[in-house]
Image: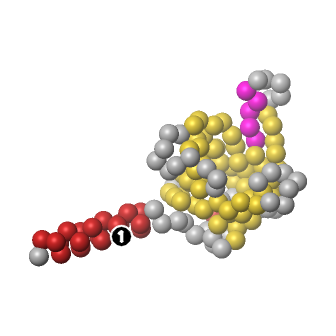
Amino acid sequence: MMNRCVKILSLVAIFFTLSANADVQLKDNSEILGKWDLHDEAVTLTGQKKAITQEWDFRADGILMSTASDVSGRISALKIPIKYSVENGEIKKQVAPGREKYESCKVIEKEGSNMILKCAYFFFLTKK
């Protein structure tokens, strides 16, 4: 009887863990349009975060305008247009401008003005 309770409790814990980390399926780009502050990135979801100062502007025309401040001060900001689309609930974005290689980014969490994306890294964004 005790073993059975332990197994059931383990299964319940696994179910809640999986449902808490379920990906958000985007219907279309209307759910992400606008400007977002990209403030942190990490190799793993719970790993150490690296601070970033970047703005991502998801535009309706399928362009993600990435704007980063130049820390060395040679220019005020570096703006890079990257193509993106929403397919099968995920964001498909160019790896680099001018290249037709794309990566898939899953929305791991989207709550209020906060969003976490899992691309090659985990990106932590806040809606402006």
Which kind of residue does numbered mark 1 sit on? Phe
Q: Which residues are magenta?
A: 67-71
Q: Which residue is mark 1?
A: 15
Q: Residue at x 20, y 68 (%)?
A: 6
The image shows residue 21, relative to residue 73, as above or below, that is below
The residue positioned farthest toward the front in the image shown: 3
Residue 13: x, y in percent? 30, 65
Is residue 28 shown in magenta?
no
Number of callouts in the render? Answer: 1
The image shows residue 83, relative to residue 123, as above or below, that is below
| In this rendering, position of residue 8 left or right of residue 63 | left
Please say whether residue 8 is visible from this viewpoint: yes
**Which image quarter holds the N terminus?**
bottom left
Mark 1: secondary structure:
helix
Q: Residue at x 60, y 40 (%)?
A: 39
Secondary structure mainly formed by the magenta segment: strand
Residue 60: x, y in percent? 77, 62
Residue 42: x, y in percent? 56, 44
| In this rendering, position of residue 67 left or right of residue 90 | right
Q: Residue at x 76, y 23 (%)?
A: 72
Task: Name the one closer to the observer, 81 or 99.
Answer: 99
The image shows residue 105, relative to residue 28, as above or below, that is above
Q: Residue at x 60, y 62 (%)?
A: 106
Please say whether residue 59 is visible from this viewpoint: no
Task: Name the one closer to the observer, 87 or 61.
Answer: 87
The residue positioned farthest toward the left in the image shown: 1
Task: Name the one closer to the observer, 58 or 85.
Answer: 85
Residue 103: x, y in percent? 71, 60
Colour logic: secondary structure
| In this rendering, position of residue 73 left or right of residue 107 | right
